[in-house]
Image (cartoon, rainbow, N blue to C red):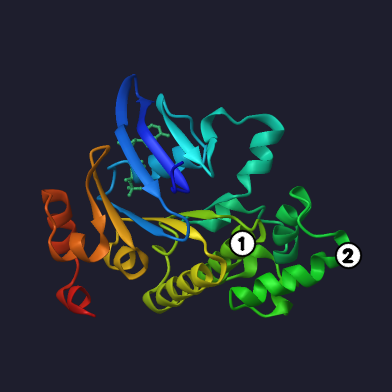
Amino acid sequence: MSAALLEATDLRKSWAARGRSVVALKEVNLTVAPGETLGLVGRSGCGKSTLARVLTRLTPPQSGAIRFRGEDWLALSGAALRTARRHMQMVFQDPLGAFNPRATVAGALADPLRIHDLVPPARRAARIDELLERVGLTADYARRSILELSGGQRQRVAIARALACEPSLIVLDEAVSALDVSVRARILDLLVDLQREHGLAYIFVSHDLAAVKAVSHRIAVMEAGEIVEEGPTDAVVDHPQSPAARALIAAVPRLIREKP
Ligand SMILES: Nc1ncnc2c1ncn2[C@@H]1O[C@H](COP(=O)(O)OP(=O)(O)OP(=O)(O)O)[C@@H](O)[C@H]1O
């Protein structure tokens, strides 16, 4: 039996755009172990978001296989898929698009608790307070509207909503890219703390190698729909082998590169 939490094999995906076909993924293979962060990095348009969407089953691949928690993930449907989905959560760059803008924070966090029947109704309010506390927000945020939050606060609520599902894997697609540097650093610290506490695995998708380096155990470098390099974070950052990895490293300011 494989020890991988997630194992993707030979994923292929093309998009139809303006009458022609764009190959976004060509035979992509990757694995993620329980409790591990795989950083997925590459320049704009290389296929990172497509891969994130295929792994989370927001988009079907043309071919390939995905095993998640020992199950054939692409074969699940109906009630079995709805039940299994809570184990793989996704956080996007713009969480506003992922929330009902009219919802309150409490409403947004109550949805997964109710849908997946994770805590009895009488315990929900207390669980929402706990989740807010876990992401560094006070309980009085529960009453606020999603619209009145800052980008960083909204991203914390998006992470809290993912945590509410008690997932084994969170796919974060450019989840900190829109935040200013100090907020970004605090969210990255939060992700690392949550991983230690809950044994979560992450796929951390970003074009920003400095952010990827800060949180990842391993890095996979994508170029034109393929993973062209993959290895432990230090090996990829210190001794990049592929032109794509070298170009990404050259683009990181020297002070960040040399930070311990
Ligand atoms: N819904 C879609 N319809 C048509 N083409 C798409 C669609 N989504 C992505 N593509 C194309 O697939 C390729 C890969 O795009 P993708 O968004 O996966 O890259 P990315 O690495 O995430 O880029 P970025 O960092 O800019 O978000 C690009 O050529 C893109 O134009």
Task: State the image quarter where residue 61 is shown.
Answer: top left
What amino acid is found at the position of numbered circle 2 in the picture? Answer: Ala
The quadrant where ligand 1 appears is top left
Instruction: Of the two numbered discs 2 and 1 on the same chain, state the one appearing first in sequence.
Output: 2
Disc 1, SS: helix
Frontmost residue, 7 versus 238: 7
Q: Which residue is mark 2?
A: 122
Q: Position of residue 62 (x, y in %)?
A: 41, 24
Q: Residue furthest top?
A: 19
Q: Which residue is farthest front?
A: 1
**Disc 2 to disc 1, C-alpha distance:** 19 Å
Circle on res. 163: 1
- Give the farthest residue toward the right: 122
Say if disc 1 is inside 8 Å of ligand 1: no
At 66% from the left and 73% from the top, the residue drawn is 132
Give amino acid for label 1.
Answer: Leu
